[in-house]
Image: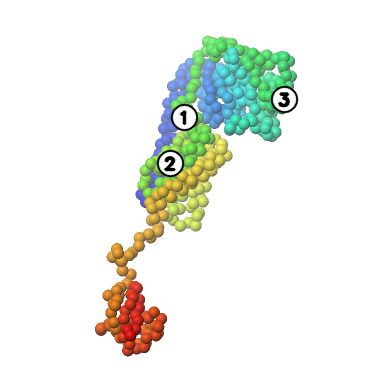
Amino acid sequence: MRMKLAAVIWTLLMLIPLMLVTAGGLLASGTTAQAAEAAQTGPAVYVVPVKQSVESGLKSFLERAYKEAAEAKAERVVLVINTFGGEVTSAEEIGELVRKSKIPTTAYVEGKAVSAGTYIALNAQNIVMEPGSTIGAASVVNSSGKLIDSPKVISFWVKTMREAAELNGRNPDVAAAMVDPGAVISLPELGTVKQQGEVLTLTADEAIKAGYAEYKAESVDDAIKWLGLENRDLIELKPTIAEKIATWLVSPIVMTVLFTLGIAGIAIELFVPGFGVPGFVGIVSFGLYFFGHYIAGFAGMESVALFIVGIALLIIELFVPSWGILGLVGSASLIAGVLTAASSPMTAFISLVIALVIAVVILYFVVRKYKDRGIWNKFILREKLTAEQGYLSAETKEDLLGREGIAITPLRPAGTIQIGDNRIDVVTSGEFIASGKTVKVIKTEGTWVVVREVL
């Protein structure tokens, strides 16, 4: 058993850091060539896609893009936006990244810049739109797509959108109308009025008329030509394989699945003998969690260390009495490792709680099915030492059954009789038998010998 637990800890110690090192290698291999090219070309235009859900993985990718553009002293960053939105928190962080960059940014809306995508576009110095594209519909919705009508949430997002619009001289009331269904705004330049109960969405032509876009271009090349940068070198930055994988791994649903498999797999391996598939799946699941968050720029080796220490303390708690101290410290360390590796500790905590409940249910059914193989069997004496197996707790007296003897003491009901040359302690069934009487053994049970008078 100890060898199995040592194998679990050793595998955790080796596999998770190995995955992080591999992640770093994948990330570096995808960026080295691009960075070298940027250093050689001099002033250039960086074309960066924003064609996915707005979440922490996208933020990490854009941070790398702006860092490389700054190192290459790029003249412009063009964000090619085509997204239905995503997390408000990530959108805010990306918006701040765009605002604070020393390199001017142009947002090229290719298809749709909806919700969080609208906010990102508003932080750019220029907005250029593809014919047929739209921008707006920035109301706040929950994970199931249902509109959030909390006045506090709407007020916050309206203020945030208005500030982004004012940043580059755009009408803040239009931005508010894209968020608040209750807002009513007249749009004389469009010859219409935005009614209550709607959120505003603008086509490319309408955005230009409303001052929310400066130009309509058929392609990114046309947009760059309009900017007067057609003679610059274009560097198209794309997510590496590791970043694409990380984008998927850091999503809340996948994160919950990984937690469930990780907790259930390791728990099953600890409670049911045989280091095999469950333990391997559990370790790989946690490894993938840290892999994704490491690539996304959230997890460090300190998070991995906290997690492994937590697992080790929980395992030690099974064998070393500590009145629960090791268990509490181990649990705190494990949770701290998971939460410090996440982009949103609260989201990770919720996923962890959900996964724990599901894992406990899975463990219950597994333990119930394999109850005869569990670790608890190491601490419970289940084997019966029966006479059939050759074990005798004391000398048996079955050979006396049916034999007669003489009571040498009164039996009240206990006393002594003599059979042949042997003196034997006996009892009656409750009756009195005087000494000198003839008795017969009617029952033997262990060391007990029961007699009755022979009349």
How dense is the environment of label 2, judged by Cα within 10 Å: few (below 14), some, or many (20 and up)? many
- Residue 429 appears at what percent x and percent y? 39, 79
- Residue 54 appears at what percent x and percent y? 56, 27
Identify the element where label 1 is drawn: helix
Identify the element where label 3 is drawn: loop
- Residue found at the far front of this picture: 455
- Give whichever of discs 3 and 2 has the lower sequence position: 3
Tell me the mark number nearer the camera, choosing from 3 and 2.
3
- Examine the rendered structure and indicate whether residue 443 appears above or below residue 138: below
- Give whichever of discs 3 and 1 has the lower sequence position: 3
- Give whichever of discs 1 and 2 has the lower sequence position: 1
What residue is shown with label 3?
A: 196
Question: In the image, what residue type sits under mark 2?
Answer: Gly
Q: Residue at x 71, y 27 (%)?
A: 182
Identify the element where label 2 is drawn: helix
Q: Is residue 84 left or right of residue 452?
A: right
Foreground: 84 or 297? Answer: 84
Tell me the mark number nearer the camera, choosing from 1 and 2.
2
Tell me the mark number nearer the camera, choosing from 3 and 1.
3
- Residue 27 appears at what percent x and percent y? 45, 28
What residue is shown with label 2?
A: 282
Any part of residue 63 in sight: no
Q: CA distance from mark 3 to mark 1?
A: 42 Å
What residue is shown with label 1?
A: 245
User: Are dots 1 and 2 in contact, CB under 8 Å?
Assistant: no
- Examine the rendered structure and indicate whether residue 93 appears above or below residue 391: above
Q: Residue at x 57, y 18 (%)?
A: 111
Question: In the image, what residue type sits under mark 1?
Answer: Ile
Question: In the image, what residue type sits under mark 3?
Answer: Gln
Q: Residue at x 53, y 35 (%)?
A: 252
Quadrant in which the C terminus appears? bottom left
How dense is the environment of label 1, judged by Cα within 10 Å: few (below 14), some, or many (20 and up)? some
